[in-house]
Amino acid sequence: MVDDDFWMALGVTVSKQPGDIGWKVKADALSGIARARTRELDLTVRIMPKLAGADLVFLADYAYGQRSGALRRPDAARVGVDSQHNDPIATLLIWYVQSVNDFATRWLRRSYRSRRVTLDGRVRGRVLIGPYMARSLTSGRANEIPCVVTERTIDTANNRVLKAGLRRVAKLAMTLPVPAARRAVRRAVAGALPRFAEVTDVEIGSGQLRATSTKGPERHYESILATTRDLLEGRFLGQTLGQAQVDSFLWSMPHLFQEAVRGILDASEDFTMDAARRPTAKYYDANGARLRSSTIDPDFILASDDGALVLDAKYKDALGIGGTDTELVESTTGPRLRVSRSDLYQLAAYRQHAAWKGAPVALIYPVAVAPNADLPKPYVVEGLGDPIWLTFIDVGSRAREHVGAFLERIAELRRSPKGSDSPVA
């Protein structure tokens, strides 16, 4: 059997009530593939995104293409696995592989590596004065000069991480349920790997990720390494969990959704993202001594000529399992969704801060807009002070068509927003 640690790391709970015919499996935020192998068992778990119809290529483009580095995003039309084979996991794997391949085509031969060397009677790069004075001169070896030299090479920590990512994708492609999807992923990896033929093979781990650099001559790696980190760091389960050997390629759908929304908002010319340091809430004891502080950190603060706007992204599906804190909101003219009361209370609290006093606040929910339909208008919640808006962004097959409509809805919230329904509170 697989240890409980494996299921806990995946955020998966398995339960069975008296009288149930089968087991009930519930996944949390992670999606992707994880494979656990023991002497008695070889188990592959595929966790699909909760929101049916989500265009992962659209989300990944905006989530990982927003940064200022030189990543050229692959044409979405090249990634056809989702539409042809209905396999969103394969879609994101291929998107990642093609991103690495496109990056390598442009930048791989322009990589540099700094290393420490001791030269005999000559100088290259930067001389290490301290070691030279303390070791070479004091020991009578003035001809031995320690230096740091920067040289052209492709066998760098950055490229090793990228190659390891490709190897891992190829390995996990074997676990995809659809043969055509497996072949598509393997073809993509096979097309990218030859560019890394002179790069050392390593296993991805925290040490390899820490060794990467995006400064100086390697600053053009910023976007592609950020993509790799977001896909692997913190989601990688490690080589072993309990007695099981584990391979995994997992990502957080809430994080992917939030970063995609950030990328879309950041691209707008109507407002700017407020990058100022977030304020804090402070704790004091009965004598007035400060105990600690906590950052007040909404997902997005937008600044415009009309003032500030406070937004939180909520990746939730109306079909998801609700709790005592969650209410199902239904409308005859718009989507249904599950709204957490704690999310509403949090937004109401945000606007009590002096920095955002009177600012409109809104929750952003993903929807997959049907063919020939328009992006739904916002809902409004009343009864918690000023209105709290529930607005929508299309993440389905027509998401790119509705980016402009989403940005216009956000701009309207700051001016004079109108909901699509009666108040839902």
Image (cartoon, helix red, strand yellow):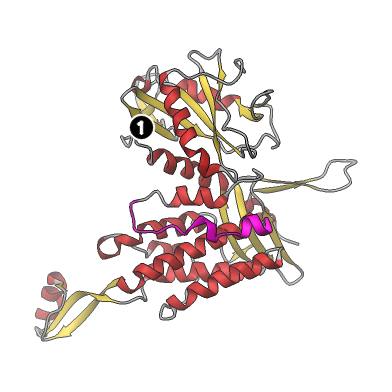
Most foreground residue, 19 or 54: 54
Whether residue 378 sits left or right of residue 159 in the image: it is right
In the rendered structure, does residue 343 fall within the stretch colored magenta?
no
Q: Which residue is at 9% across, 83% downward?
A: 142
Residue matched to label 1: 270
Q: Position of residue 102 (x, y in %)?
A: 43, 65
The part of the chain drawn in magenta is 68-86
Q: Secondary structure at mark 1?
A: loop
In the rendered structure, does residue 84 fall within the stretch colored magenta?
yes
Whether residue 59 sits left or right of residue 368 in the image: it is left
Kindly tell me whether residue 183 is visible in this rendering.
Answer: yes
Which quadrant is the N terminus positioned in? bottom right
Whether residue 412 sits left or right of residue 321 in the image: it is left
Q: Position of residue 425 (x, y in %)?
A: 61, 16
Q: Amino acid at mark 1?
A: Asp
Q: Which residue is at 52% across, 29% downward?
A: 363
Q: Position of residue 179 (x, y in %)?
A: 70, 68
